[in-house]
Amino acid sequence: MPPTTTGPTTASVHPLAALPWEELVTSALLGTDRRPPAAPGGPVLTTARPPCWTPPPCTPCGGGPGCCPPCRGPGPRPRRTTRARSSPRRPGTGWPSCSPTGPRLTPSGRRGAAPDLTELIPQWLATANRRGFRAPADLVPPLLDAARARTDLRPQALAFAGPLGLWLAALNPEWKFALRGGAGGSLVPDTGDPEAVHRLWEEGLFAERVALLDAVRTRDPAAALALLTTTWSTERAEDRLMFLDSLRNGLGAEDEEFLEQALADRSRNVRATAAELLSALPASAFAGRMAARATSCVNPDRTGAGASIAVEAPHECDARMRRDGVVADPPTGRGERSWWLGQLVEATPLGVWQERFGGRPAAEIVALPVADDWAGELHAAWCRAAVRQRHPEWARALLGEPSAPPAGTPGPTSIAERSKLLAVLSEVERADWVAAFIDAHGLSEAFQLLGVCTVPWSGPLGRAVVDALDIARDGGSYPWSFSGVMGLAERCLDPAEADRLEVLTATPDEQEGASPGAGGYWSEAFQRLVSTLRLRAAMEAELT
């Protein structure tokens, strides 16, 4: 049935219409019982409601297999619907304002001191999902509209919408994104029902098949591999790549034979992914082959007085290397031999090097001098190996001390590469390292590092960020240079820090040499930070 629409109802002039927009939105976010708007006198008559897609009527069918979710009853999640008073809804529509245009600006072009509610919607959805809530049925259509406008909302929005959202998405072409891979959800049958699993695998949409393979893989890795092999030879190359990526979950020795066969795939990307997965299996034959090649190139240098590393890069990329996923042609600007060496070292289990260098720990190995200016290439390959193999000891060694200047560390100087290494460490160690980095180097290079830290930030990390912002303000720094970090702080600082930050909301005295008007901007920014933290605390409390 084609989608239908209903026109807006005629609305009388609402007595709240004269109130500021921010006042209305804040009341909708926190709930009118906690923050009643100061409405002028007069009864509330009606409100206009925008057009909304209306699903076709459902004929009660007793909840059969093909029936819609309302007839089937609740899915596997608790049937807890929420109209929580704290939901950041746009007044009159029943759902959040999800404009992708960014924060609202004042007439002067400044963001102002009010919280940016659009930035809180993902956090509100994540909290609602974590608490086991499900969206009321009449809010699912506007929820899907919001997810269509903002891709960052899709995983959490579709989880909140539940099976009803996916059922409706199959009926409305504008919501087809919910049925594509990566959209955040799909209708998956009971993985313990072989007939239902086989039917969906043979007949389902691509997103449904990916979700099915992931679900089966989580329950029974061997069964998922067997399911994949039944259609592997007939799948499109891009689909084979996505299915192969599902094997990361529960990767084990029983996957080796299949991955070895995938090394001969006609798709270069499939071959590369198969090689990457095999390199994460230290006992695999592939890892042994790559280790043999790499250790013929990198060895302890026994010619000098002290310990060091000698490197002799490969002179050719033969057919067996290419079969094992080594790409023969280097990118523009890279030498062939260094390109081949990097790929061999990256695919070699890191434990091999500790055996090769007499049982030295990783920190000692990466500190050894490397002959003939090969240190950068070798350390970069070890960094990629540490990320691929999720090896905390090597990641820690390559990161070095956070207080050291990037040029003085054994590993990468690139912040992007450091971020990848940090992601290998535990949440606590990651936050402590970034906090120490900020204490030593400030915030100018910390934005990407902060992005890999768990939310809410730990106490030491949060204090390091706020102290660095305070130092920048006192130093008369240009405030807009820190807008990105300030935006992260609004979303990631622990809301319990709000009271401690109140002192920073005052407008500082203008200093000689400071940017004109910088004090006012800093004051607004800290006021917005404090207000946002308190709003997040209220949201969490309402959904608890």
Image (cartoon, grey):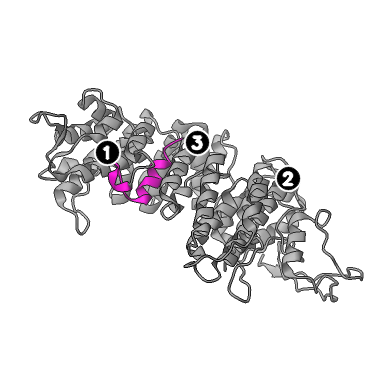
Are dots 1 and 2 in contact, CB under 8 Å?
no
Comparing 503 with 221, the one in front is 503
11 vs 23, nearest the viewer:
23
Q: Earlier in the sequence, mark 2 or mark 3?
A: 3
Which disc is residue 541 wearing? 2
Q: Give the magenta range.
A: 406-426
Q: Name the residue type under label 1.
A: Ala
Residue sitting nearer the eye, 306 or 268: 306
Q: Are marks 3 and 1 in contact (CB under 8 Å)?
A: no
Foreground tag (2 vs 3): 3
Outermost residue to the top:
359
Q: Dot 1 corresponds to which residue?
A: 347
Tally the marks: 3
Above or below, 380 against 89 in this view is above
Of badges 3 and 1, the one in the foreground is 3
The first of marks 1 and 2 along the sequence is 1
Marks 3/1: CA distance? 28 Å
Name the secondary structure under disc 2.
helix
| Residue most extreme to the front | 512
Quadrant assignment, res 147? bottom right
Q: On the rendered structure, is 495 left or right of 291?
A: right
Q: Can residue 155 be seen?
A: no
Q: Which of the numbered marks, if any, corresponds to residue 428? A: 3
Residue 117 vs 415, above or below: the answer is below
Q: Amino acid at mark 2?
A: Ala
